[in-house]
Image: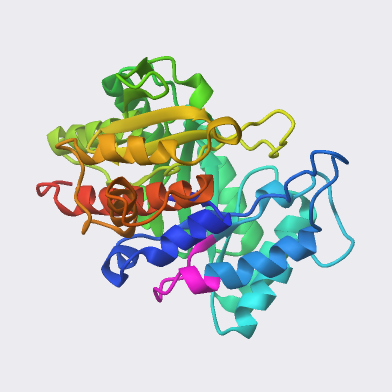
Amino acid sequence: MPILRAMPAVLEAVGDLPGPVQAAMIPLFELQPPDLDPVTQQPRQTVDRVLAMREPQIARAWRDATPPRLDLGLLDSPGRTAGPTHELTTVLDAARQRGRSLVPVTAPGRSPAYEAAVRQAIQQDGLGVCFRVPIGVFADPARAAQLLVAECQRYGLRAADADLVVDARSIRRNLLSSTQAQRWVAALAAVPTPNDWRTLVIAGTAKPAGISAVRELQLTGNARIATARLARTEWAAWLGVRAAYARAAAAPRMPWFGDYALGHPDYRPFDARVIRSVAQIWYAVGGTWLVYRGQQVNDVGVGQFRRMAADLLALSEFRGATFSEGDLYISDVATRVRAPGQAGEWRRAGTSHHLTETVDQLATLPPGP
């Protein structure tokens, strides 16, 4: 279950996926507030305008019959009790008019108005709910059980009507994957009645929030390009959970793997005054991120992407142009079939590759729990 920020480039990447790849996942789409205008520091668009754009974009991107999960927590206001129609209801109503379905996502601490919108959706659609619970809650098994029982009672549901996402969010990159796996095993052991949930997922990411946080970058022969290899600790940790369950005499239910693809769980509004677009490529292969960083696009332009793409194409780890739409784009830019695009095109390409890579990894695992 990839947790994906529902921005245009990401949704286009999801739309690029062939049917069998989409059928192998259930995405959790997270809607974010509008970006800020760099001059006025006011939102560039109204929330209503963003919702009006995103719902049809999601409908076009996701063709599989399984309803995706939708989280509007970033648009919720703590303590909100009443007022205009909640944004969650607005999006779900628009989806219904298209004959499409979305499963609402909720989490501890959402406002009474958000909870009311979730209850309305459950009653109207009969699709249950997705609970997204911080992993810290499971440090206290009694508290976790009490919270989840209360959440099911709040919405009049059984565990079988709900997905449970144990959300580790951002995990430390310098932590051994074996240590992270042990922590995940301990958290999962605190999940009450694990076999009863409709879907059980553990999700997290060790990907840094931004390229500036990657201290491992080393300059290449081209002094304007730096590269690094980073561990996909979340993938190695999930494999560690799988290995631990395989050794257990009575293995509990194995959770699905979840990550944030090229995104990050921490949200910060885009502010062009302080955030400069730096040319970068993130390419997941196996348990590793291959990272390329260039210069600021405003200073050097997008031509630098061609050299980074060519360097990536030359590696044995490159999956080949036919692997995904993202890989085809990288290959085409590297071989001058098409011109390099702006950051959004590279986010689209990287996300397309990442989702395909993860589905392929899961599909080719040896039999296990």
- In the rendered image, residue 179, in percent from the top left (x then y), is placed at 31, 19
Quadrant for residue 152, please give it. Answer: bottom right
Spot occupied by residue 309 in the image (x, y as percentages of width and height): 32, 40
Q: Is residue 142 above or below residue 363?
A: above
Residue under the image location 41 percent in, 71 percent down = 66
Query: Could you say which is closer to the camera, residue 194 or residue 345?
Result: 345
Residue 124 percent coordinates (x, y): 64, 78
Answer whether residue 88 is visible to the viewer in this image. no
Nearest to the observer: residue 37 or residue 4: 37
118 magenta-colored: no
Q: Position of residue 131 (x, y in %)?
A: 54, 52
Q: Please, is residue 143 above or below residue 362 in the view?
A: above
Instruction: Decide if residue 50 is on the left or right side of residue 219.
Output: right
Please state which of residues 214 and 66 is positioned toward the viewer in this rendering. 214
* 206 displayed left or right of 80: left
The residue depicted at 38 percent of the width and 30 percent of the height is 292
Image colouring: rainbow
In this rendered view, identify the residue nearer to me: 114 or 169. 169
The image shows a total of numbered marks equal to 0
Q: Which residues are magenta?
A: 59-69
Left or right of 79 on screen, residue 301: left
Residue 315 versus residue 91 in the image, above or below: above
Taking the spot 32% from the left edge, 32% from the top edge, the residue there is 289
Q: Is residue 90 visible to the viewer in this orientation of the structure?
A: yes
Q: Quadrant of residue 283?
A: top left
Picture quadrant of residue 121: bottom right
Q: Residue at x 70, y 42 (%)?
A: 109
Instruction: Give the overall secondary structure of the magenta segment.
Output: loop
